Amino acid sequence: MGLDKKALGRQIQKARKAKGFTAERLADLCDLSTTHMRQVESGTKGISTEKLVTLCNILEVSSQTLLQDSVVKVEQDDLSSIVAEVQGISTKLNAIVSDIQGRYQKP
């Protein structure tokens, strides 16, 4: 599963406005820069779990409220391509390890 940062940002912004906070005020309360808060709300930057909990407490909303519509299911095709890529990396890594072992084995 993945996280749709834009959807999360929209929910944060919606909750912030409902509380009557500016982005600057919320950033200050969360000990974030205003720039970072704006990036989180626009979905261009993520936020730590710790800061998400802080946001929930300040905005008086549940994490479920902020995360609704944000969790993205990975499609089977995407998962298959990820598995194939990992297997390819594993094959390359095994070849590198075998090569290194071959170079350093005593005759």
Image (cartoon, rainbow, N blue to C red):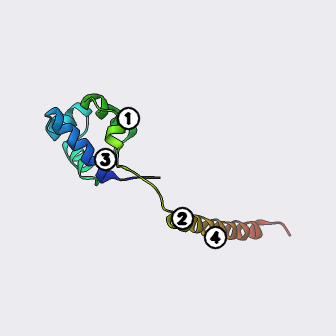
Residue located beneath label 3 in the image = 8
| Residues marked 1 and 2 touching at CB (< 8 Å) | no
As measured in the structure, the alpha-carbon distance from the residue carrying label 3 to the one carrying label 4 is: 37 Å
In the rendered image, the vertical position of residue 7 relative to residue 14, given as above or below = below
Q: Amino acid at mark 1?
A: Glu
Q: Amino acid at mark 3?
A: Leu
Residue located beneath label 4 in the image = 92
Residue located beneath label 1 in the image = 50
For marks 4 and 1 on the same chain, the one whose residue lies earlier in the sequence: 1
* Side (left or right) of 58 relative to 71: left
As measured in the structure, the alpha-carbon distance from the residue carrying label 1 to the one carrying label 3 is: 15 Å
* Side (left or right) of 104 relative to 10: right
Mark 3 lies on a secondary structure that is: helix
Residue located beneath label 2 in the image = 82
For marks 1 and 3 on the same chain, the one whose residue lies earlier in the sequence: 3
As measured in the structure, the alpha-carbon distance from the residue carrying label 2 to the one carrying label 3 is: 24 Å
